């Protein structure tokens, strides 16, 4: 029975390792979108991970989807102002739910702001007075 010799190194394995080491773009990009959610962008699911990373660095996925939804809402309203076309119902419902979430988060941020102002009142009274005056100027009467 003849034995076949196996090569001591695999050229294809060596080539894969070197090509991976020489890449300029990262193999993966992880960006949190929502707490507990992540989206991985890599060479397997994007034809240009470096470009996608730059775009997401400037305009997050949430911002992109928000702008698209706002533009689409205008088009849906122009097409179906009375809401009689059922095909747009799911979009309208989703958009309303997102608006409610945003309003709830805005209220929570204002509550945190008020707590921070209370802290500044104790720790940095001058800063508190300055910010209080600034807020008074900006709030409608």
Image (cartoon, helix red, strand yellow):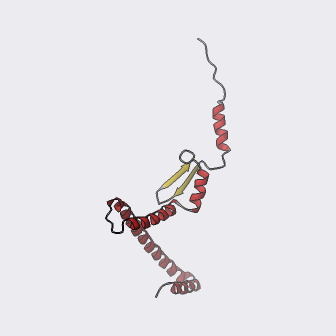
User: Which residue is painted at 61% across and 16% down in the image?
Assistant: 3
| Quadrant where the image shows the N terminus | top right
Q: Give coordinates of residue 139: x percent, y percent.
A: 49, 84
Q: Quadrant of residue 101?
A: bottom left
Q: Position of residue 19 (x, y in %)?
A: 66, 41
101 relative to 24, above or below: below
What residue sits 48% from the left and 79% below the top? 114
Of residues 85 and 141, the one drawn nearer to the viewer in this rendering = 85
Query: Picture quarter containing residue 12?
Result: top right
Most extreme residue toward the front is 79
Residue 129, placed above or below residue 3 = below
Question: Which quarter of the figure has residue 13?
Answer: top right
Is 74 in front, or is 1?
74
User: What is the count of numbered marks?
Assistant: 0
Compared to residue 55, the image places residue 24 above or below, namely above
Q: Residue furthest top?
A: 1
Q: In the image, residue 73 lies at what x, y percent? A: 42, 66
Q: Is residue 129 left or right of residue 99?
A: right
Above or below residue 10? Residue 121 is below
Q: Residue at x 36, y 61 (%)?
A: 88
User: Residue 36, percent across and down?
Assistant: 46, 57
The reply, left or right, for residue 130 in relation to residue 93 is right
Give 24 or 68, whichever is nearer the viewer.
Answer: 68
Q: Residue at x 52, y 84 (%)?
A: 138
């Amino acid at each position: 029975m003849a034995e076949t010799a196996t090569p001591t190194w695999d050229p294809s394995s060596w080539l894969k390792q070197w090509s991976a080491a020489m890449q300029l773009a990262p193999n993966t990009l992880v960006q949190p979108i929502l707490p507990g959610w992540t989206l991985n962008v890599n060479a397997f699911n994007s034809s240009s991970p470096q470009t996608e990373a730059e775009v997401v660095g400037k305009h997050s996925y949430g911002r992109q989807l928000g702008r698209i939804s706002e533009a689409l809402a205008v088009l849906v309203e122009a097409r179906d102002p009375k809401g009689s076309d059922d095909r747009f119902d799911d979009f309208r419902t989703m958009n309303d739910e997102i608006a409610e979430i945003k309003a709830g988060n805005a209220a929570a941020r204002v509550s945190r702001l008020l707590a921070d102002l209370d802290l500044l009142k104790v720790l940095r009274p001058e800063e508190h007075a300055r910010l209080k005056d600034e807020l008074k100027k900006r709030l409608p009467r």
